[in-house]
Amino acid sequence: MNRRQLLTTSVCGIASTLSGCFTSRLHQDPTYLETVEGIFISNDKKTVAVIGKKYHYIFDAPPQLLAALSPSLHPAIAHAGFDSFKVDSQNKIKGTLNLYTSESMSTEEVSLATQAGFGPDRGKRWSARLPMKGARYVGQDIGSTNIQRLNKNYTLTITEEPSLARSALNIAATPITVAADGAVALGVVALSPLWLPIVASGPCFFCAK
């Protein structure tokens, strides 16, 4: 093989490798980063609202979450995290809310956790995986003094279908508003801070460890 043939073969090999890598990336669903500033639950206990700098995410509240928030079980919840969230072409979002108990639950708390759908996890702690479904909306600046309820901001990574890049203008405006007295509301229903020990780690929507 002469020098020209060797060079051509090498270039083709490199081009083929790059092409394969590029094709692989094209088939991956795109992701984006979101900074979460507040997590709320509606006063009628039907809705969970996650307020980000760019988008707002409104979910149906899972029944297990309400059980976990009860005064009898809530003190035993040690960690919480959202993960594996994906937005489809209709701006519907779904994923999982993970709840983890401490390893030192009382007999009553173990009983309540069992009734709420928790099961044994690592060590002596229990966990529950709650499916979350909702919708994504274009956010608006509703005033940081009204939504800075977390001890710090959390950056999350959300996967979306590729077609959403071409339909960004079709996302509905958020129904979350702020009243004259500074209260945050979803339509006519007031929102209150959702007190869960959120932890964030890695490229997911609040991964719990």
Image (spheres, rainbow, N blue to C red):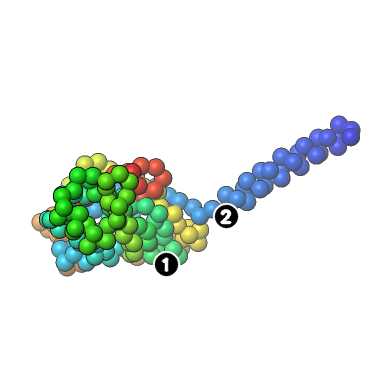
Q: Which mark is residue 46?
A: none
Q: Secondary structure at mark 2?
A: loop
As measured in the structure, the alpha-carbon distance from the residue carrying label 1 to the one carrying label 2 is: 20 Å
Q: Secondary structure at mark 1?
A: loop
Q: Residues within 10 Å of mark 2 (few under 14, many from 20)?
A: few
For the question of whether residue 137 can be seen, the reply is no
Judged from this view, the residue extending furthest toward the front is: 107
Marks 1/2 in contact by CB < 8 Å: the verdict is: no
Who's the residue at 38% across and 62% down the image?
93
Residue 100 drawn at (x, y percent): 27, 50
Residue 53 drawn at (x, y percent): 31, 50
Q: Which residue is mark 1?
A: 90
Whether residue 3 is situated above or below residue 101 in the rendered picture: above
Whether residue 189 is situated above or below residue 192 in the rendered picture: below
Whether residue 9 is situated above or below residue 120 in the rendered picture: above
Quadrant containing the N terminus in the rendered view? top right
Who's the residue at 27% across and 57% down the image?
118
Residue 119 drawn at (x, y percent): 29, 56
Residue 109 drawn at (x, y percent): 17, 54
Q: Which mark is residue 27?
A: 2
In the image, what residue type sits under mark 1? Gln
Q: Earlier in the sequence, mark 1 or mark 2?
A: 2
Residue in the foreground of this view, choosing between 134 and 139: 134
In the image, what residue type sits under mark 2? His
Left or right of 119, for residue 6: right
Who's the residue at 21% across and 41% down the image?
151
| Residue 13 occupies quadrant | top right
Left or right of 140, for residue 31: right
Q: Residues within 10 Å of mark 1 (few under 14, many from 20)?
A: some
